[in-house]
Image (spheres, grey):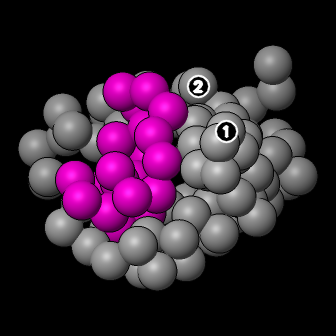
Amino acid sequence: MTRLVEDQHRCDRAAEVLKALGHPIRIRIIALLCDGECNVGAMAERLGATQPAVSQQLRILRLRELVTVTRVDGFAHYRLAEPKLQTLIQCMESCTFC
């Protein structure tokens, strides 16, 4: 695998991912989805946010291909599209600056 220092395209993509995660609610959504898939209503309740606010943040994550959605019985269920985001969340949780 090419190191980031040597690959501008991968650096550009990494910057896009970090920008997409650059909001506290989006980080919390990703952290929540590390535990498994979830629907918008359950996420909103767990995060203490409104459904429209969570939906707006999920849209950004979906456009950046960080989460995927499936519809079951009229409910949208979200899950991580990139399982290695779990490692990123774990890293942030263990950092001393957090």
Disc 1 marks a residue whose amino acid type is Val
Q: Which residue is mark 1?
A: 72
Name the residue rendered at 85%, 53% in the picture: 8
Residue hosting label 2 = 83
Q: Is residue 27 visible?
A: no
Please indicate, yes or no, whether residue 76 appears anywhere in the rendered image.
yes
* C-alpha span from label 1 to label 2: 22 Å
Screen quadrant of the N terminus: top right
Toward the viewer: 64 or 17? 64
Marker disc for residue 30 = none
Count up the numbered dots: 2
Any magenta on residue 48?
A: no
Quadrant assignment, res 91 = top left
In the image as oriented, which residue stretches furthest toward the front? Answer: 73
Question: Dividing the picture into quarters, in which one does residue 12 lie?
Answer: bottom right
Q: Nearer the viewer, residue 19 or 1?
A: 19
| Residue 97 in the figure: left or right of residue 72 | left
Write the start and end of the magenta stretch as one range. Answer: 25-46
Q: Is residue 72 left or right of residue 91?
A: right
Q: Earlier in the sequence, mark 1 or mark 2?
A: 1
- Which of pointers 1 and 2 indicates the residue nearer the eye? 1
Amino acid type, callout 2: Pro
- Determine crowd level at label 2: few under 14, some 14-19, many 20+ residues with C-alpha closer than 10 A: few
